[in-house]
Image (cartoon, grey):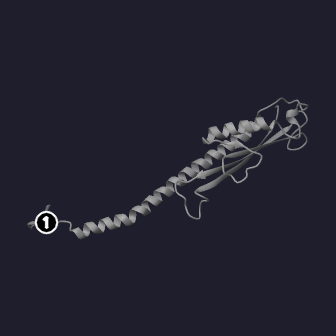
Amino acid sequence: MAIRVRGRGPVRHRATGRTMGQSVVEFAIVLPVLLAFVGVVIDVSRLYQAWINLESGTRDAAQYIATSGGTSDTTDSLYSPAGANQAANNSAAVRILNGATGGTFTASSSLGSCSQATVTTQMQYYTSTNGGTTAFPAGRATVTTCLPFRTLFAYPFLTINGAWKLGSTKEFTTLVGR
């Protein structure tokens, strides 16, 4: 390759084997750092998306459970102090969370160790507190979720067997039958 410099003849430059080897060594040192950085960015992005979806799905499930169901008739067993139809609430929460997160949630009475995606629901009715009356009881739905999140890489000191545990608890209170 010839380069003309003003007032002089052609100057020839060529890469020596030593400078090409230096570039390869520099690339070999920088590449793992860059790949690790890209991996962390991808995992944090996936974690944020999973957390946002879990929060949204939990909130939607609590709202649905609190606002769905029954009439304003307080003699209906739906408004008993023991709560509503637990199986129907669990089924609705599982359906909503599966749609929101793309996961496969199962209903449980407690979250346990969070080895799988689980959801617990609780519905309470108040006729004299929280703005509730006998005609229109206040219904408070509480939905608690747990989702194990698998990372692309098992980060030392940050994950337990390559997973983080995401959790969310949402409450929604409304006047029922109004």
- Residue drawn at the location 73% of the way across and 50% of the way down: 111
Confirm whether residue 136 shows in the render.
no
- Badge 1: how crowded within 10 Å, few (<14), some, or many (20+)? few
- Residue drawn at the location 81% of the way across and 35% of the way down: 85
Q: Quadrant of the C terminus?
A: top right
Q: Is residue 106 above or below residue 27?
A: above
In the rendered image, the residue lying farthest to the bottom is 18
To which quarter of the image does residue 77 belong?
Answer: top right
To which quarter of the image does residue 173 belong?
Answer: top right
- Which of 156 and 76 lies nearest the eye of the viewer? 156
Q: Where does the image place residue 99, in percent across and percent down from the top left?
A: 63, 37
Q: Where does the image place residue 60, in percent across and percent down from the top left?
A: 69, 40
Secondary structure, mark 1, is strand
Q: Is residue 81 above or below residue 1?
A: above
Confirm whether residue 128 shows in the render.
yes
Left or right position of 45 against 97? left
Q: Where does the image place residue 129, in percent across and percent down from the top left?
A: 88, 44
The residue under label 1 is 12
Q: Quadrant of the N terminus?
A: bottom left
Instruction: Tell me which amino acid carries mark 1.
Output: Arg
Q: How many marks?
A: 1
- Residue drawn at the location 63% of the way across and 51% of the way down: 148
Left or right position of 174 against 17? right
Q: Where does the image place residue 130, in percent across and percent down from the top left?
A: 85, 44
Q: Is residue 134 above or below residue 150?
A: above
